């Protein structure tokens, strides 16, 4: 039953010829679409004007601030207690 499932086109699920009729194309030869030259990917090592080392320091600072703020939140809400 499942041996030739991919090639079985008698299923009504895959019978698309009955559902759609021929439609006129949206674009004709009279209205050509202007071709835009494709730009290649240009590697830019600076993101927001920052060098990679500066971005790393900024990411570390955000990580430390997140750790400090989350631990302060846990202390304020009483989820953890200081040992003194």
Image: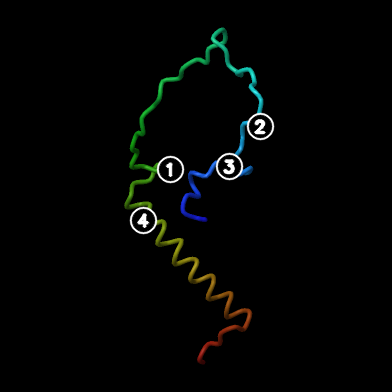
Residue 39 point in image, percent of width and height: 39, 27
Disc 3 to disc 2: CB gap under 8 Å: no
- Residue at point 50% right, 55% down? 2
The residue under label 1 is 48
- Counting residues from the start of the chain, the first of labels 1 and 4 encountered is 1
Residue 19 point in image, percent of width and height: 67, 33
- Give the side of residue 57 with respect to residue 84, left or right: left
> Can you tell which quarter of the image residue 81 is in?
bottom right
Disc 1 to disc 3: CB gap under 8 Å: no
- Counting residues from the start of the chain, the first of labels 3 and 4 encountered is 3
Give the Cα distance between marks 4 and 2. 59 Å
Give the Cα distance between marks 2 and 1. 54 Å
Residue 35 numbered tag: none
Q: Nearer the viewer, mark 1 or mark 3?
A: 3
Crowding near the residue tagged with mark 1, few <14, some 14–19, many ≥20 C-alpha atoms within 10 Å = few
- Residue at point 58% right, 78% down? 74
- Counting residues from the start of the chain, the first of labels 4 and 2 encountered is 2
- Counting residues from the start of the chain, the first of labels 1 and 3 encountered is 3
- Residue at point 60% right, 44% down? 11
Residue 33 point in image, percent of width and height: 52, 15
**Nearer to us in this view, 58 or 33:** 33
The residue under label 4 is 56
Residue 18 numbered tag: 2
The residue under label 3 is 10
């Amino acid at each position: 039953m499942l041996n030739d499932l991919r090639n079985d086109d008698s299923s009504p699920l895959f019978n698309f010829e009955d559902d759609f009729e021929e439609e006129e194309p949206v674009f004709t030869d009279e209205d050509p679409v202007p071709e835009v030259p494709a730009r290649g990917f240009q590697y830019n090592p600076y993101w927001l004007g920052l060098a990679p080392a500066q971005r790393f320091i900024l990411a570390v600072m955000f990580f430390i601030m997140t750790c400090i703020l989350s631990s302060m939140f846990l202390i304020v809400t009483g989820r953890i207690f200081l040992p003194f």
